[in-house]
Every structure is written in C-alpha cells, then in structure tokens.
Amino acid sequence: MDDNLEKNKKTSVRPVIIISLAVLGLGSAVFYLVTRSMPKDLTANRNFQKVYSLSDISQHNNAGDCWMAISGSVYDVTDFIPEHPGGDNILLGCGKDATSMFNQRPNDGTSHSGRARSILENYKIGTLSK
C-alpha cells in the first residue's frame, strides 16, 4: 500500500510542475513582447526623470559628449551629431541652453520642424532644474 501512495504522490506532482513551467514561460514571453514594443527612448533612458543644472550640462560641451537643454528638457544628442541635417551647427548648442537656437536656427532663422522635435524626444535624458 505504501508503494501506491508514493506512486500517487509522484503522478499528482507532475501536472503542477508542468503548469508552473507553462505559466513561467508564458509570463516571460509576455514580458519580452511588451518591452520589445516599448519606444526606444523609454527602454534606453532609464534616468528620464533626472534633473540637471546648467552647470551639469556645461560639462558635456563637445562633439564626443554633447548635451543641451531645450525648453526645459535635457538631451544627450551625441549619437545624433553625425545624422544632423544641419551639419556641425548642432555643436553650437553643446553644453548650453539651446532653446533659442532650436527655435531660431543660426543658418536661416527658422524653427526646427515637427519631425525634428519628435526625433529630439528620443534623446531626452531629463529635465532642467529651475
């Protein structure tokens, strides 16, 4: 009789293990799909809510490390420099509050487009302290 009891314990544990593994696998798959579909800026910039001073920003003032403040937000645009349609003009804003330059471009006095503004959001790392 003890053999039958031991055998029943083993067979009743198997479905629990199988169901647990299936739930774990499903949860992992859902997590992967949700994080994969998140916008790049939300997954890459974990310090999105960090607050920076102009002094902090001023330390990132060259082509190899370029931060700028625009309209109260702080952006690390270092990786965008080679893609900037206006060429090296972007370097004029490195390490500064570049709001006026962004709203009135140095080469022609016009404001950046809506597309440029949406691209900029991908580089947001925080906000400017008041």
Image: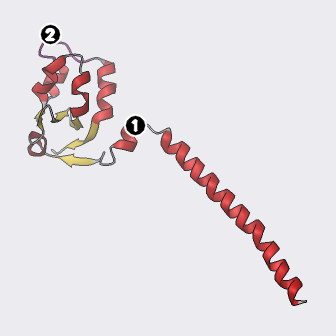
On the image, which quarter does residue 73 sit in? top left
Say which label, 1 or 2, has the lower sequence index.
Answer: 1
Label 1 vs label 2: CA separation?
Answer: 31 Å
Quick check: 114 left or right of 71?
A: right
Image quadrant where one finds the N terminus: bottom right
Q: Which residue is mark 2?
A: 108
Residue 77 can be seen, yes or no: no
The residue at the point 53 percent across, 46 percent down is 32
Instruction: Give the vertical position of 119 relative to 105 (above or below).
Output: below
Q: Secondary structure at mark 1?
A: helix
Instruction: Give the vertical position of 20 relative to 126 (above or below).
Output: below
The residue at the point 59 percent across, 48 percent down is 29
**In the current view of this chain or complex, which residue is farthest to the top?**
108
Q: Nearer the viewer, residue 114 or 13?
A: 13
Question: x and y percent of residue 117 in the render?
Answer: 30, 24
Q: Which residues are magenta?
A: 104-112
Image quadrant where one finds the C terminus: top left
Amino acid carrying mark 1 in the image: Lys
Question: x and y percent of residue 88 in the render?
Answer: 14, 20
Residue 52 can be seen, yes or no: yes
Amino acid carrying mark 2 in the image: Asp
Q: Secondary structure at mark 2?
A: loop
Foreground mark, 1 or 2, reads 1
**In the current view of this chain or complex, which residue is farthest to the right?**
1
